[in-house]
Image (spheres, rainbow, N blue to C red):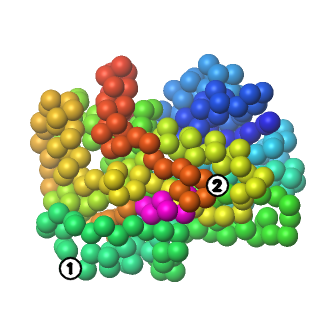
């Protein structure tokens, strides 16, 4: 079996690549990554140890992509994931996330290749998510237990990032319509784990731990600056496991969209995350307060995993404490990486 992973030197892509290399016999895995993101060269070196070749190609360049070898499956992890980039660099977000998908799908059509596409929970309408908390301005902890499934509203604005991911989903369905090719679309929530070089607007879990461990400043941003916004978190190992299961069952289970995340048991507020990081690192740092909320920010998101659980008998294995512990141990073992968390 031959697999190409786009964004293969990113956090998610590199972990999936290594996991599948260990798990599947006689598999040839390649990566496509232009290495512009923080930490990508480190991950490329990790891939080399498993004989995984990276093609240093910009996903926007179909004239180069079309000459890549033929693959049985493409796992599309390539994306500009930071929501705030929708304002700062919209061309990059649009070209990477949508034109990039378009190019990969042309390659799939040409070679008769199946695809597993990593989409995002950010396809859902910002206003509808905010409406879930009409009676709570986040001056106090959230008590809502609402879980979001794949039927939640996507009609109104979700950020340019959310638009490009949702549009990519539609492109997949158009390209694969009336063919024998197979696809899976996975709308993932927050993913965290070792080898994630986090920042304020993307990868906040390892950032929070690193700032505590190395005694650097942090701030609660938005919604009054109280740290009461809530997200669920999924360990990268659990991501790798469901991708592996989907590959094994792709011939029978395909052409379907899933919501996948940590779920209710793995949900946490920033304030509670701070408390756990203090206990884990034995350090207490100053947490600033920035009240102003970005128009793209959401106060609450917890994944409904019932569909993925029913079809694959899968559920997250690692709880929030294990996620934090694994990242902490990784950081302790790799303190030379602390400058990546400035």
Mark 1 neighbour density, 10 Å: few (under 14) some (14–19) many (20 or more): few
Residue sitting at x 71%, y 63%: 255
Q: Determine if residue 117 is in view.
A: yes
Task: Identify the residue position indicated by label 2 in the image.
Answer: 117
For label 1, the residue is 135
Q: In which quadrant of the rendered view does residue 240 lie?
A: top right
The image shows residue 334 at horizontal and vertical percentages of 37, 21
Q: Residue at x 45, y 63 (%)?
A: 304
Taking the magenta stretch, the answer to whether it contains residue 167 is no
Q: Quadrant of the N terminus?
A: top right
Name the residue rendered at 32%, 79% in the picture. 131
Residue 91 spot, x, y in % from top left: 56, 61
Q: Is residue 137 above or below residue 46?
A: below
Magenta highlight range = 303-308
Q: Nearer the viewer, residue 103 or 142?
A: 142
Kindly report the distance in space between the C-alpha atoms of the residues bearing marks 1 and 2. 36 Å
Instruction: Give the quarter of the image for residue 222.
Output: bottom left
Residue 63 vertical position relative to residue 99 in the rendered view, above or below: above
The residue tagged with tag 2: helix, strand or loop? strand
Judge whether 169 appears above or below 73 on screen.
below
The reply, left or right, for residue 42 in relation to residue 70 is left
Residue 301 screen position, x and y as percent: 37, 63
């Amino acid at each position: 079996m031959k697999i190409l992973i786009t964004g293969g030197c990113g956090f998610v892509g590199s972990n999936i690549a290594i996991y599948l290399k260990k798990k599947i016999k006689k598999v040839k895995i390649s990566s496509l990554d232009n290495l512009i993101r923080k930490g990508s060269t480190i991950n490329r070196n990790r891939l080399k140890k498993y004989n995984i070749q990276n093609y240093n190609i910009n996903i926007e360049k179909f004239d180069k992509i079309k000459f890549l070898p033929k693959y049985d499956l493409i796992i599309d992890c390539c994306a500009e994931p930071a929501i705030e980039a929708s304002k700062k660099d919209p061309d990059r977000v649009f070209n990477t996330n949508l034109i990039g998908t378009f190019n990969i799908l042309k390659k799939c059509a040409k070679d008769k290749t199946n695809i597993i596409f990593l989409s995002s929970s950010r396809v859902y309408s910002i206003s509808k998510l905010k409406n879930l908390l009409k009676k709570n301005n986040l001056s106090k902890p959230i008590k809502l237990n609402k879980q979001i499934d794949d039927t939640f509203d996507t009609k109104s604005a979700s950020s340019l990032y959310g638009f490009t991911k949702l549009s990519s989903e539609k492109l997949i369905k158009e390209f694969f319509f009336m063919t024998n090719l197979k696809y899976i679309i996975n709308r993932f929530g927050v993913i965290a784990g070792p080898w994630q070089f986090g920042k304020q607007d993307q990868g906040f879990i390892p950032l929070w731990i690193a700032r505590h461990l190395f005694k650097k400043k942090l701030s609660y941003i938005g919604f009054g600056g109280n740290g009461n916004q809530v997200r669920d978190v999924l360990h990268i190992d659990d991501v790798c496991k469901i991708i592996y299961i989907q590959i094994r069952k792709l011939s029978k289970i395909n052409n379907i969209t899933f919501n996948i995340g940590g779920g209710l048991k793995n949900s946490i507020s920033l304030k509670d995350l701070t408390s756990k990081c203090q206990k884990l690192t034995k350090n207490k740092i100053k947490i600033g307060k920035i009240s102003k909320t970005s128009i793209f920010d959401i106060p609450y998101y917890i994944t409904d995993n019932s569909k993925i659980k029913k079809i694959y008998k899968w559920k997250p294995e690692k709880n929030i404490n294990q996620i934090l512990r694994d990242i902490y141990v990784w950081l302790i073992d790799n303190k030379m990486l602390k400058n990546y968390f400035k």
